[in-house]
Image: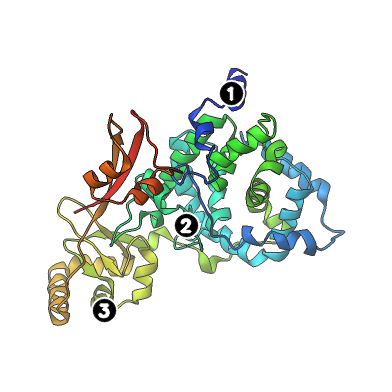
Amino acid sequence: MFCRLLILIIIFLNLSPICSQNKQEVVNFHDDKFLKFDTLFSNFKLIESNIIKDSLFNEELIRLRLDSLNRLTPLELTYNQTVLKFIKFYIKQRKSQVAKLLALSDYYFPIFEEYLDKYSMPLELKYIPIIESSLRVDARSPAGAVGIWQFMYYTAKEYNLRINSYLDERRDVYKSTEAACQYLNKAFNIFDNWELAVASYNCGRGNVTKALRRSGGELNYWKIRPFLPRETRNYIPALISVIYVMNYASEHGIKADTTYSIDTHTIDTIQLKKPIKISHLAEVLQIEQSLIEDLNPVYKNKLVPYRSGEKFHVVLPHYKWGVFLNNEDSIYSLLNKMEEAENLEYPLFSDIEKIKYVVKSGDYLGRIARKYKCKVSEIMTWNDLSSSKIRVGQKIYIYRTIK
């Protein structure tokens, strides 16, 4: 009760960092704009006009099933006509895709659950990547969000995911899952409500805070829903529906399409001693290049890096893993000869360093930009500044390349 009262006071008095961030019309990219790539969720507009009336679709039974799931989670799994429309949409119009997701979930859900448990978060949050990416690690939205959890570039940097000429850790299922848990956990600590935290994953904490103010201080997703961005109004209904469909797919005649199953017993990893070109490795091991790329989506430009003091791994089918280990010296010798024949030079391995700068007396953005050899416009973008005015004690974040 105290937390709810405190949130209301903060909203109305407009004294918190959350509220101050949202005086601007543009949501802070650090604060979190997660844009999605999703073939299920983006087509919700079909539901409104094309839902098929089905006398065999037992709505009361669906309500009872959802109620039983609701008793097992801190999330509020509300049943209403909007949620029902989503359920019908997935079962009627996306049946084959649900079958694919059931197969993929056997591999991905245990990974998600491990990190959710680590942060003591509801395990039902594991269904968010279905809404975000349809469980595709290589997903990329038109807005530039990448990976199974769909991180935008600067949000990824905020949560320490590396993106450079070799790597994009937004495509690393383990590291991106931990980053997503950190984001959601932080959002829950702000809103003290899981539905609002999840909504902020879609539109940003700033937009949720605006909706809270515009609603008169309501702390319930369904009551602030009219004040949220259009896409976010359907985000929670979509999530609730996915939770239902994934738990009761068999009752609706949907079974996992095992052609999409990932068997963890058939793959293993090797640690590299040098940078390699994936096409070279594929040729030496006599394996399809596309298979190595699919098993290692974190690597960009079809190259695997190497840097002293760091460990870079390649996932291989188990039957080729043994071949590599048993012939390691000769394989590296062949790889070296292939590089020499192509006169291959690997791009410089670099990372982005995040620097926190505290504004001092006499500082202005031009001076800070010169100090860190960047542009004023870049500093304004990195920090979501609407003007060049800064104040003493203000924290400014700078991003620069390190080698």
Relative image position of residue 17 (x, y in whole percent): 48, 30
Q: Amino acid at mark 2?
A: Ala
**Residue at which label 1 appears:** 13
- Closest to the observer, 66 or 33: 33
- Closest to the observer, 221 or 96: 221
Residue at 34% in and 38% down: 396
Q: Quadrant of residue 321?
A: bottom left
Q: Is residue 361 visible?
A: yes
Q: Which mark is residue 387?
A: none
Secondary structure category for the residue under label 2 = loop
Relative image position of residue 268 (x, y in whole percent): 32, 60
Q: Amino acid at mark 1?
A: Leu
Q: Earlier in the sequence, mark 3 or mark 1?
A: 1
Q: Is 162 displayed left or right of 1 in the figure?
A: left
Q: Residues within 10 Å of mark 1 (few under 14, many from 20)?
A: few
Q: Earlier in the sequence, mark 2 or mark 3?
A: 2
Secondary structure category for the residue under label 3 = helix
Q: Which mark is residue 145?
A: 2
Relative image position of residue 299 (x, y in whole percent): 32, 63
* Disc 3/disc 1 C-alpha distance (Å): 65 Å
Relative image position of residue 350 (x, y in whole percent): 23, 56
Quarter of the rendering occupied by the N terminus? top right
Residue placed furthest toward the bottom: 341
Q: Residues within 10 Å of mark 2 (few under 14, many from 20)?
A: many
Circle nearer the viewer, 3 or 1: 1
**Residue at which label 3 appears:** 283
